[in-house]
């Protein structure tokens, strides 16, 4: 990823989500209590989504590739990986002026045709303190 961020995995019961001590952090082999032991499972971005895609029968990660206008996808058999190399999905409509494209997110709740059609949103700046959120349909095949 261009200017990517390391992604690490953690887990916690929903009922305990506000209890920092309840979290467990994956080191690649086991789950521990120290967040510093969490292993990097892939490179991503600070805004990233992961959800199960029924069409692929795999987990799908969606994010903007660093500071570019490209949205990318990764797949894995489980949230903790192993994650595939990123696959180019599409180039976003470029931002205007000094703005930029960010916050590429997948929307499992909108998926169609058994997950073959995914919907991805992103934000792009359109001027000083203005912008828009765009929604794009992406046909998922053979990732």
Image: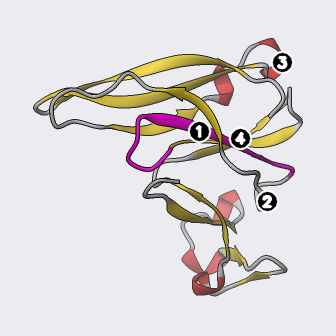
User: Do callouts 2 and 1 mark residues in contact (Cβ within 8 Å)?
Assistant: no
**The residue tagged with tag 4: helix, strand or loop?**
strand
Residue that appears at 74% across and 14% down: 112
**The residue tagged with tag 2: helix, strand or loop?**
loop
Dot 1, how many residues are within 10 Å of its Cα: few (below 14), some (14-19), or many (20+)?
many
Whichever of callouts 3 and 1 sits on the residue coming sooner in the sequence is 1
Residue 91 x %, y %: 48, 27
- Asked if residue 65 lies left or right of residue 117, the reply is left
Mark 2 or 1: in front is 1
Structure colour scheme: secondary structure
Q: Which mark is residue 51?
A: 4
- Up the image or down, 94 lies above or below 30; here it is above
- Asked if residue 143 lies left or right of residue 64, the reply is right
Q: Which mark is residue 72?
A: 1
The answer to which of 18 and 90 lies nearer the viewer is: 90
Residue that appears at 79% across and 59% down: 81
- Asked if residue 66 lies left or right of residue 109, the reply is left
- Up the image or down, 43 lies above or below 99; here it is below
**The residue tagged with tag 1: helix, strand or loop?**
strand
Mark 1 or 4: in front is 1
Whichever of callouts 2 and 4 sits on the residue coming sooner in the sequence is 4
Whichever of callouts 2 and 1 sits on the residue coming sooner in the sequence is 1
Residue at the spot of label 3: 114
Dot 4, how many residues are within 10 Å of its Cα: few (below 14), some (14-19), or many (20+)?
some
- Asked if residue 91 lies left or right of residue 57, the reply is left
Tell me, yes or no, whether the highlighted magenta stretch contains residue 73: yes
Task: Specify start and end residues of the magenta stretch as a single range.
Answer: 65-77
The answer to which of 32 and 140 lies nearer the viewer is: 140
């Amino acid at each position: 990823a261009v200017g990517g961020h390391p992604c690490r995995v953690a887990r916690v019961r929903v009922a305990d989500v506000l209890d920092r001590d309840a979290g467990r952090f994956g080191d690649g082999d086991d789950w521990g209590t120290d967040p510093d032991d969490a292993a990097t499972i892939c490179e991503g971005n600070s805004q990233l989504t992961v959800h199960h895609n029924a069409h692929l029968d795999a987990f799908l990660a969606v994010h903007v590739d660093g500071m570019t206008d490209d949205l990318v996808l990764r797949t894995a058999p489980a949230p903790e990986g192993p994650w595939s190399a990123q696959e180019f999905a599409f180039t976003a409509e470029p931002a205007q002026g000094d703005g930029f494209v960010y916050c590429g997110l997948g929307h499992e709740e909108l998926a169609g045709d058994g997950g073959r059609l995914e919907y991805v949103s992103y934000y792009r700046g359109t001027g000083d303190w203005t912008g828009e959120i765009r929604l794009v349909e992406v046909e998922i095949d053979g990732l």
